[in-house]
Image (tube, rainbow, N blue to C red):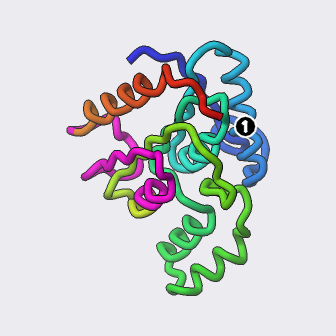
């Protein structure tokens, strides 16, 4: 593989300043794409994100400046991942859903109610993921008709490039980028 890469950190994560909010994270994601377009105006551009970033990569796939998006262990909604985290933290079943609904109103979700045609999407998820459940990767794939799904049996939330399936994962990424680099945006 030989690609140019632009990486970014979300506000409030890593060395970045600020407080993470869903609106702010969405603005960060859009600013990242704008910077990518500015730096590589004639290149085939893709976004790839992990976990929170994977969820926003799916939403960014509606951007006409992108040739594709890769979601690594992304979650389907803030409410769903909030309910999952509450349940894992000991909150009783049912109450976790109610609390997530109250605390995380439906805004800036990766799977938008108004989901438009998207660029091609590759969804990668480990079946042993204890952070974002595997079923969320499957749900993403089912909701996005044009997506491809790469299950990673025996893998958790990260490090897909390592271990016995690492070469297959890297080959799948290379194939996804290659197959979609020459396709003009349809929007």
Q: Which class describes the residues within 10 Å of circle 1: few (<14), some (14-19), or many (20+)?
A: some
**Left or right: residue 30 compared with residue 168:** right
179 lies above or below 25? above
Instruction: Please give the name of the residue rendered at 73% of the width and 54% of the height, measured from the top-left corner.
Output: 22
Residue span colored magenta: 137-164
Task: Write down the quadrant of residue 105 in the picture.
Answer: bottom right
**Left or right: residue 66 compared with residue 72:** right
Q: Nearer the viewer, residue 87 or 119?
A: 119
Instruction: Please give the name of the residue rendered at 30% of the width and 48% of the height, measured from the top-left corner.
Output: 152
Name of the residue lying farthest toward the front: 186
Q: Nearer the viewer, residue 62 or 29?
A: 62
Q: Position of residue 49 (x, y in %)?
A: 54, 40
125 lies above or below 33? below
**Left or right: residue 110 compared with residue 178:** right
Q: Position of residue 59 (x, y in %)?
A: 63, 47
Q: Which residue is mark 1?
A: 30
Q: Position of residue 64 (x, y in %)?
A: 66, 32
Quarter containing the C terminus: top right
Quarter containing the N terminus: top left
Q: Element under label 1?
A: helix
Instruction: Please give the name of the residue rendered at 57% of the width and 46% of the height, measured from the top-left corner.
Output: 58
183 lies above or below 164? above
Marker count (numbered): 1
For residue 131, say whether it is visible: no
Residue 150 is a magenta residue = yes
Instruction: Please give the name of the residue rendered at 50% of the width and 58% of the height, measured from the top-left corner.
Output: 143
For residue 98, say whether it is visible: yes
Q: Position of residue 131 (x, y in %)?
A: 46, 59
Name of the residue lying farthest toward the left: 164
187 lies above or below 39? below
């Amino acid at each position: 593989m030989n690609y140019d890469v632009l990486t970014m950190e979300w506000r409030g994560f890593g060395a970045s300043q600020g407080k993470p909010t869903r609106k702010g994270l969405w603005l960060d994601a859009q600013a990242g794409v704008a910077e990518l377009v500015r730096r590589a105006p004639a290149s085939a551009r893709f976004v790839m994100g992990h976990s929170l970033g994977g969820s926003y990569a799916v939403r960014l796939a509606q951007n006409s400046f992108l040739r594709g998006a890769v979601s690594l262990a992304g979650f389907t909604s803030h409410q769903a991942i909030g309910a999952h985290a509450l349940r894992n933290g000991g909150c009783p079943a049912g109450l976790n859903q109610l609390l997530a609904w109250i605390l995380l109103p439906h805004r800036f979700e990766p799977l938008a109610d108004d989901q438009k045609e998207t660029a091609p999407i590759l969804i990668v998820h480990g079946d042993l993921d204890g952070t974002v459940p595997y079923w969320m990767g499957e749900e993403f794939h089912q909701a996005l008709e044009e997506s491809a799904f790469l299950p990673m049996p025996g893998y958790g939330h990260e490090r897909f490039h390592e271990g016995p399936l690492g070469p297959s994962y890297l080959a799948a990424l290379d194939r996804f980028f290659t197959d979609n680099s020459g396709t003009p945006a349809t929007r």
